[in-house]
Amino acid sequence: MKDHVSPAKGQVAPEQTLTNEQALSPEALEDTQRPLNADSLAQEREAVHHDTESAHDSRSRTDTAAEPSFEGCLGPVPRVAMLGGTFDPIHHGHLRSAIELREALGLDHVLLVPSHQPPHRAAPGVSSDQRLAMLEAAIEGEPGLKADGRELLRDGPSYSADTLASLRAEYGPQARLVMAIGHDAFLKLGDWHAADRLFDEAHVVVIERPDHDAPLPRALEALIQGREVDSVAALMARPGGHLLRLSLPTRMAISATFVRERLALGDSVRYLLPEAVIRHIEAHGLYCPSSS
Ligand code: ATP
């Protein structure tokens, strides 16, 4: 099995990652309880575009106080998001979210990380290797998205806190590292293994999903208290520790469950997922219609 990770090497800055308390400015702490929507995203993108265009000076200007020598020696600070999941199978809801997330946050790339042994749900019926292969087929030719098979190399439950720690070690303490999750997964975040550690390693960005807008459980409220920011700029001011809720332009009500159900019935899944993934499913006889 090969590792599909192609992280930016050699970007380690001499400075320590700031603590969450240091990371949260008073403006950043303002809790709007609203996801950033398409209009505000357009404004944010304008700002991010400006930032990206002049990244080599503006990022160093923005970060000057915290990291005086970083830019000059080692180049721009990496901006990377991980979107983890079972991807059983990957579909257009995942893919549009990843593309729009990258644009909204001005990221270098989004890593799609299939879970080898999902800790919080039943084991998928399709192997990790096959799920990774479908993911690779889905993103072929899209430079902004990368398949990352690092969780397949670890035994035991695939905890996101461990995956983020490994990404942090690779990208360096100043990298802007984001864990992106859909709102359905976010609602369960308070029950995740080592949930606090997630914020030690990265920001959490929540992607709104149609039909997933239940109120936040109390354990989750406690976990995110004081972390929510209301702009991309506030998020990117620090390497991690913040929470941002995003309403991306395309909100697709597609789920892998729905895709699997259709496949099991022998119904068409065309246009719900990439043709290359459908071809892979057919070629390998995955999700076969039940014979009963
Ligand atoms: P299942 O139906 O099997 O639970 P899923 O479609 O929710 O699967 P996952 O692999 O569990 O897919 O999801 C990976 C991540 O992508 C999760 O954070 C999930 O919330 C998010 N996600 C899944 N589908 C969408 C969608 N249509 N729009 C936005 N985010 C999504």
Image (cartoon, rainbow, N blue to C red):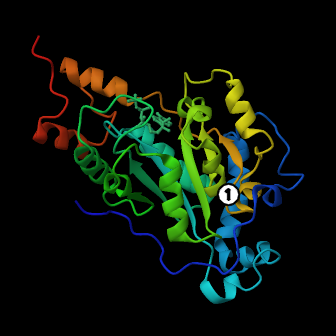
Nearer to me, 179 or 262: 179
Residue 59, compared with residue 247, is above or below; it is below
User: Which residue is identified by label 1?
Assistant: 240
Q: How many marks?
A: 1
Residue 262, compared with residue 141, is above or below; it is above
User: Visible in this render: residue 67?
Assistant: yes
Instruction: Point out residue 64 in the picture as x, y percentages from the top left corner.
Output: 79, 78
Per the image, label 1 sits on a secondary structure element best described as loop
Instruction: Point out residue 166 in the picture as x, y percentages from the top left corner.
Output: 49, 62
Position of the C terminus by quadrant? top left
Q: Is residue 54 left or right of residue 108?
A: right
Position of the N terminus by quadrant? bottom left
Mark 1 closeness class: few <14, some 14–19, many ≥20 residues within 10 Å: many
User: Where on the picture, by quarter, is residue 62?
Assistant: bottom right
In the orientation shown, which residue stands out farthest toward the top?
292
In the orientation shown, which residue stands out farthest toward the bottom?
73
Q: Is residue 35 left or right of residue 270?
A: right
Nearer to me, 93 or 242: 242
Q: Residue at x 58, y 44 (%)?
A: 194
Q: Residue at x 63, y 20 (%)?
A: 214
Q: Residue at x 58, y 71 (%)?
A: 172
Q: Ligand 1 falls in which quarter? A: top left
Q: Residue at x 41, y 51 (%)?
A: 113
Nearer to me, 174 or 156: 156
Circle 1: residue type = Gly
Instruction: Point out residue 231 in the picture as x, y percentages from the top left corner.
Output: 75, 50
Instruction: Point out residue 201 in the picture as x, y percentages from the top left corner.
Output: 61, 57
Q: Is residue 116 left or right of residue 47?
A: left
User: Visible in this render: residue 98?
Assistant: no
Residue 33, compared with residue 54, is above or below; it is above
